[in-house]
Image (cartoon, helix red, strand yellow):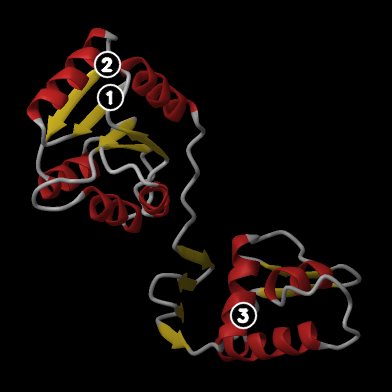
Amino acid sequence: MKLLVIEDDRTTADYIVNGLRQEGHVVDHLAEGREALAQAMVGAYDVLVVDRMLPGLDGLSLLKALRAAKLTTPAIFLTAVGGVDDRIEGLQAGGDDYLVKPFAFGELSARIQALARRPQATPQETVLTAGDLTMDLIRRRVMRGGVEIDLLPREFALLEHLLRRKGRVQTRTMLLEAVWDISFDPQTNVVETHISRLRAKVDKPFGQDLIRTVRGAGYRVDG
């Protein structure tokens, strides 16, 4: 495995790095938070070992920045800060595991191997497309043929759901559950009304329909 150890105490760092290298891993070591953040972004590591108390940028802020940048590399906090609230804070900041100093090297090694075995989540797309229509989920912007389309929040959510399942029919029940969080039939035409409004904005002005009605089944986005 390729590992990055982020630890500012030289004695502790040497102990960890030497032990991991003896196990056959490729190990990089950095002692400063901001430098480690930049390296973690480009280093393609299998696991990060992160101390909380770092100069320049603390470990919590480092992990938060990595997760905000959609980097999903597994990370274990290795720190002397070991209260229950501290562990919760570390996990909520984006850590996948938390080990308190003093520690046994064998346990650290086992936890690193366990993290590396976890299947990595596939990051969701942030730009969805169908034909000449694009939906930017970060900027919350929908464009078609270079023209920006103003959608209400529920219309945006409905279109996003359809785009994520492009080419697949979505029934009325599926849409109620996914977009309105309704698990029963409210006996209203809320789905039909919103589909109609969406078509009026997304399809009608552009002369080509992307949102299709599949008779007796539901709706589908083509393109």
Q: How crowded is mark 2: few (under 14 residues within 10 Å), some or many (20 or more)?
A: some
State which mark lies toward you, 2 or 3: 2
Location of residue 151 (image quadrant):
bottom right
Q: Where does the image place residue 120, in percent across and percent down from the top left?
A: 48, 38
**Does the image show residue 144?**
no
- When asked about the image quadrant of residue 49, the answer is top left
Which element carries disc 3, helix, strand or loop?
A: loop
| Crowd band around label 3 with a 10 angstrom C-alpha radius: few (<14), some (14–19), many (20+) | few
Residue 148, label in figure: none
Q: In this view, does 129 lie to the left or right of 209?
A: left
Q: Can residue 129 be seen in this view?
A: yes
What residue does disc 3 label? 208
Q: Are marks 1 and 2 in contact (CB under 8 Å)?
A: yes
Q: Position of residue 141 (x, y in %)?
A: 43, 79
Quarter of the view holding residue 41: top left
Marks 2 and 3, how far apart in space? 56 Å
The disc at residue 2 is: 1
Which amino acid does the dot numbered 2 rest on?
A: His
Task: Residue at 33%, 34% (x, y): give it.
Answer: 100
Q: Mark 1 falls on what kind of element?
A: strand
Q: Residue 25 carries which label?
A: 2
Mark 1 and mark 3 lie on one chain; the one further toward the N terminus is 1
Q: Distance between the residues labelled 1 and 3?
A: 50 Å
Residue 93: x and y, percent?
A: 36, 54
- Does 66 appear above or below 19? below
Give the mark nearer the N terminus: 2 vs 3: 2
Amino acid marked by disc 3: Gln
50 and 221: which one is in front?
A: 50
Mark 1–mark 2 distance (CA, rounded to whole Å): 6 Å
Identify which residue is drawn at 45% across, 70% down: 137
> Are circles 2 and 3 on residues that touch, CB within 8 Å?
no
* Residue found at x 16% / y 42%: 36
